[in-house]
Structures are given as structure tokens and as C-alpha cells.
Amino acid sequence: MSEKEIVSNKQQEKDGISRRDVLLGMSAAASMVYAGSASAAASKEHDHSKHSTQLTDLMDAVNNCTDKGRRCISHCMVSFTEGDTDLAECASKAHEMMAICGGFAYLVASNSSYVKEYAKVCEKVCVDCAKECNKHDQHKECKACADACDDIVDAIKLSLA
């Protein structure tokens, strides 16, 4: 670097901002304004109706079922730690239901074209889970899981009929 360039750089450091920095900043600001106006114009023409689930009642039923299943499994696990394995099949069916309903929730939320096909599997798993959980309806968590599974079966029939 020449002595003249060193003096110039020191002067810029002293002054704070160079002409080049100002021009770069103005260019960046202009680009952002242009991009923002283009984005705003595009969003006015963009259809947002499919950005959330179209099957809200079914989505609520799926979420309720997974919540109740989580509670049922937790209850079963406490029984296991106390040495009681009578709820093993209940926990197993609730575990299967959680896996299937978890995937189904994603499909319903995203308005997937696979919802109807996957609903058949979800319905069958929920029927099996409800049947097993009803064997233990003296436990409020098992009863709530069975009821939630029955609700999702009804919601599938109502939403996808």
C-alpha cells in the first residue's frame, strides 16, 4: 500500500464513513425496497386458503387422541414401575396409536392427498386401541384414551365421508 493510500484510509477511519460505504448502503436499501414491493404484489395474488388444515374438526380429534394416548401410556408406565404389568397390552396399543396418529396429524395439517388412504389405517388402529383401553376403563387415563380413539373414528367418518 502506498503512503497516499494509508493517509486516505486513516482519513476515512477518522471521518467514519466513506463515499463507497454510502453508495453500497443506498444500493442495498434500494434492492430491499424493490424486493419488498415485488413480494407484496405477489402475495396479493397468492392463494392462502390452503395454508392451514381444511379439516379442523379432524385435526382437533387427532390432537386430542394423541394427548390422551400420551397420558394413558404415562399411566401404564407408572404401573410398570410399581411391578404391575396388567396394562402392558394397553400401553402397546396406545403406543401404536400414537405412532399412526402422529403421522396422520402431519398429513391432515398439510392437506395431504394421502389423508383418505391413511385414515383407513388410523381408524383401524384407533378401534383396536379403544377396544384394549376399554378393558381397563376403571383407570381414567385408559378410559379417556378409549373415548378419544372413538372420537377420532367418528371424526374420520364425518370429515371424509
Image: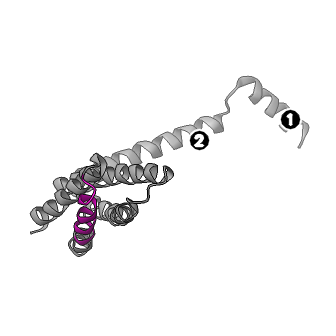
Residue 125 is at least partly visible in this image:
yes
Q: Which residue extends farthest bottom?
A: 117
Q: Does residue 116 appear to the left or right of 18 in the view shown?
A: left
Q: Please say whether residue 154 is one of the residues in the magenta stretch.
A: no
Task: State which quadrant residue 113 falls in.
Answer: bottom left
Quadrant (top left/top right/bottom left/bottom right) for the C terminus? bottom left
Q: How many marks?
A: 2
- On the picture, is 84 further left or further right than 25? left
Label placed on residue 6: 1
Q: Earlier in the sequence, mark 2 or mark 1?
A: 1
Q: Position of residue 5 (x, y in %)?
A: 84, 38
SS assignment at label 1: helix
**8 to the left or right of 79:** right
Write down the residue under mark 2. 24
What's under tag 2, amino acid-wise?
Leu
Is the stretch drawn in magenta largely helix, strand or loop?
helix
State which region is magenta.
124-137
Residue at the image position 23 percent from the left and 57 percent from the top: 146
- Based on the picture, tell me whether residue 135 belongs to the magenta stretch: yes
Nearer-the-camera pick, 97 or 72: 72
Q: Report the front residue among 15 and 120.
A: 120
Could one spot residue 45 in this view of the protein? no
* Colour logic: one colour
Instruction: Residue type at mark 1: give it.
Output: Ile
